[in-house]
């Protein structure tokens, strides 16, 4: 197990390096630079000076190693679009709303989705199943900005219960969190339903019934335990959404989160911020998959004890 | 005492394409300590009959009806959730065809035997574990303690089927349903498992229902045989008598098709035609389209399953 984790950590380091090189090259392959915007035109001389002062006139590999050297010391540079602060300060300011929005969304949506999926699987081919499946399919197919608009229309405009936008007092968080929660809810409902049905159709469930176990024990101890295996692998990666926030939900509800910076950092050629955001997501993906795989191994005796038959 | 009493059992499955009739008016009974073999081709309804007796089929799509379906004196069709659970494993236990998929892969063998014991009897865990270990030793597992803590994927098919038998017997059931218990095993293991089942049946005085398509298995393990075809009982009687002098044309054809009963090299004998389609069974006797001695009325009306001589029943117009 220790060797396995060490191997995985090494492969994470490799992934991280490869992603950083590719993203860095792509970023600079896009024509234009941070001072080519039309709203504040600067002369070529000024532009050259600015580029020189930021080191953007140096060869790409020098820029890359300089940036990565900084990253290793937790220095992600200064965002060009907000030069008064460092990238880390910007993240510290913009991340919390995204974290609350996404975290609460997943923590509310996932359990509800699991319950909905369980109900659908246990009452398969009844109205409960059809209703749950229809709801889950709608949740996955209706774009989240449409859901957001509907929520604003009903709860802010018609009923006037909650503010239509903004991120102030906690009650203003409700609508964006609900809008965001529909995604994990729908995803989890579908996953749970199919994972449960898959297990319910296994021959060992018939054996458990033939032994005279109560239906409750069969479902809660045996079926859920086995259905949890495939679900563990999708649960943590879903939390990555909490880092990126939902660009659409944040835009619809004017939440001052990270989402907007993903777009603006690309549009404004804000190299330092762009790199920082992508490296951050890469790291979160790697770590969440590593934790998922470890959990999977712990839950699955076939991996934990090795696959020998004897 | 009648342990199992089934009269006119029908089992159908409602599907999109229509209704499939798996069992069409089965009648059978089993007395305490008796062993009965149910023989038939795939799709003849033998497994479904057993599953229906324990209400293990999902309803719907399955639909079970019978004039009588009593197990250990309990009306199975009237029983609900908790009553059924009390019946299963305790009054009647079942072992299945494929031991590799019969255990929950996430729990140890010990856990799965212990939970069976605890489901039916208020037993302390340590006590139940000791019983489980003794059971594993009884089914001739040498390393019983180790197997108790093993996960299903760590054991071979033969070992798992032994463990399965141990689990089925953990609550001293009065009837054991064995649904093709050796089909998925190596030939060398098959005889051992059959011998074990036979021994345990005698030792515990259980009733045994052995479902199989293998006439050799029947000859070795049971007292009485019931031959099924197309969801109906064709013939029933003591095993030796049926092998020596089969009454029903289907049983006669079946026995004639066993290779090597007559010495010398010869062409394999087969029964011409194919098994009836359960979604659209032939009218009358299900065997009449393949029967060498069929008469006109065989295709019109099904003959009743009735006594021919003492202890022997058959469903054939020629024997009425």
Image (tube, coloured by chain):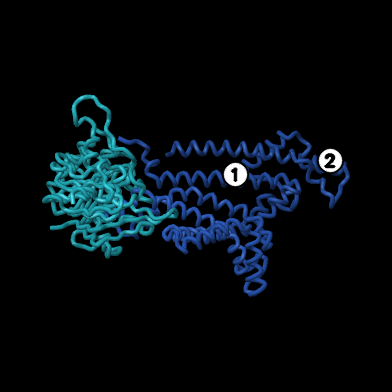
Query: Where the C terminus of chain A falls, by quadrant?
Result: top left
Q: In the drawing, what numbered circle is on residue A48? A: 2
Q: Earlier in the sequence, mark 1 or mark 2?
A: 2
Residue furthest out toward the front? B296
Instruction: Tell whether A27 sits left or right of A182.
Output: right
Q: Is residue B193 visible?
A: no
Instruction: Tell whether B16 sits left or right of B62.
Output: right
Q: Nearer the viewer, residue A185 or A239?
A: A185
Question: What percent of the width, then of the height, locates residue B279?
Answer: 38, 51
Say which chain tag 1 marks: A
Task: Tell which chain the image draws in blue.
Answer: A
Q: For the residue labelled by badge 2, is the local secondary structure a helix, a strand or a loop?
A: helix
**In this view, A84 is above or below B184:** below
> What tint does the image give chain B?
cyan
Question: What percent of the width, then of the height, locates residue A95?
Answer: 63, 55
Query: Where the N terminus of chain A falls, by quadrant?
Result: top left
Label 1 vs label 2: CA separation? Answer: 33 Å
**Image quarter for residue A70?**
top right
Closer to the observer: label 1 or label 2?
A: 1
Instruction: Tell whether A256 sits left or right of A195.
Output: right
**Image quarter for residue B152?**
top left
Q: Is residue B117 visible?
A: yes
Q: Nearer the viewer, residue B318 or B161?
A: B318
Residue at 48 percent across and 37 percent down: it is A6
Q: In the drawing, what numbered circle is on residue A282? A: 1
**In this view, A129 is above or below B281:** below
**In this view, A5 is above or below B73:** above
């Amino acid at each position: 197990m220790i060797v396995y984790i060490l191997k995985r950590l090494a492969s994470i380091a490799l992934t991280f390096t490869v992603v950083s090189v590719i993203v860095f090259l792509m970023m600079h392959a896009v024509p234009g630079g941070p001072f080519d915007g039309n709203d504040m035109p600067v002369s070529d001389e000024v532009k050259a000076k600015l580029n020189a002062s930021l080191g953007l006139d140096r060869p790409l590999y020098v820029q890359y190693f300089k940036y990565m050297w900084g990253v290793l010391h937790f220095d992600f540079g200064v965002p060009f679009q907000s030069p008064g602060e460092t990238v880390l300060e910007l993240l510290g300011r913009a991340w919390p709303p995204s974290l609350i929005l996404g975290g609460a969304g997943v923590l509310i949506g996932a359990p509800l989705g699991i319950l909905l999926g369980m109900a659908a699987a246990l009452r398969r081919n009844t109205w409960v199943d059809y209703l749950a499946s229809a709801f889950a399919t709608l949740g996955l197919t209706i774009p989240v900005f449409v859901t957001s608009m509907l929520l604003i229309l009903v709860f802010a405009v018609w009923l006037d219960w909650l503010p239509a936008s903004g991120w102030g007092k906690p009650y203003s968080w409700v609508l964006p969190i609900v809008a965001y929660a529909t995604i994990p809810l729908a995803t989890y409902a579908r996953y749970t339903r199919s994972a449960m049905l898959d297990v319910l159709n296994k021959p060992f469930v018939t054996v458990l019934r033939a032994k005279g176990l109560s239906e409750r024990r069969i479902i809660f101890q045996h079926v859920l335990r086995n259905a949890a295996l495939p679900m563990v692998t999708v649960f943590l990666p879903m939390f990555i959404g909490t880092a990126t926030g939902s660009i659409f939900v944040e835009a619809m509800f004017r939440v001052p989160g990270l989402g907007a910076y993903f777009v603006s950092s690309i549009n404004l050629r804000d190299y330092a911020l762009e790199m920082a955001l992508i490296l951050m997501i890469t790291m979160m993906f790697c770590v969440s998959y590593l934790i998922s795989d470890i959990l999977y191994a712990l839950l699955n005796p076939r991996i934990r004890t090795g696959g020998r038959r004897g | 005492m009648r342990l199992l009493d089934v009269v006119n059992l029908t089992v159908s499955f409602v599907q999109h394409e229509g209704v499939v009739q798996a069992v069409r008016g089965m009648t059978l009974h089993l007395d305490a300590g008796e062993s009965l073999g149910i023989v038939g081709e795939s799709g003849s309804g033998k497994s479904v009959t057993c599953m229906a007796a324990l209400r293990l089929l999902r309803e719907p799509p399955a639909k079970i009806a019978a004039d009588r379906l009593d197990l250990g004196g309990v009306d199975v069709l009237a029983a609900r959730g908790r009553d059924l659970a009390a019946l299963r494993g305790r009054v009647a236990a079942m072992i299945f065809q494929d031991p590799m998929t019969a255990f929950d892969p996430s729990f140890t063998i010990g856990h799965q035997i212990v939970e069976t014991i605890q489901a039916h009897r208020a037993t302390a865990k340590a006590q139940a574990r000791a019983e489980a270990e003794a059971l594993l030793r009884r089914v001739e597992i040498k390393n019983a303690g180790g197997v108790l803590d093993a996960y299903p994927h760590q054991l071979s098919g033969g070992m798992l089927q032994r463990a399965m038998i141990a689990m089925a017997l953990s609550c001293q059931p009065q009837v054991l349903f064995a649904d093709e218990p050796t089909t998925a095993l190596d030939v060398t293991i098959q005889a051992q498992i059959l011998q074990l089942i036979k021994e345990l049946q005698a030792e515990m005085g259980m009733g045994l229902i052995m479902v199989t398509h293998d006439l050799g298995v029947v000859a070795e393990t049971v007292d009485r045989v019931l031959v099924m075809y197309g969801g109906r009982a064709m013939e029933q009687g003591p095993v030796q008598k049926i092998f020596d002098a089969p009454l029903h044309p289907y049983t006669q054809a079946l026995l004639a098709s066993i290779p090597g009963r007559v010495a010398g090299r010869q062409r394999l004998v087969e029964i011409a035609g194919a098994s009836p389609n359960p979604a659209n069974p032939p009218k009358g006797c299900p065997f009449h389209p393949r029967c060498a001695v069929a008469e006109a009325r065989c295709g019109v009306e099904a003959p009743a399953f009735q006594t021919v001589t003492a202890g022997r029943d058959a469903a054939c117009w020629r024997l009425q």
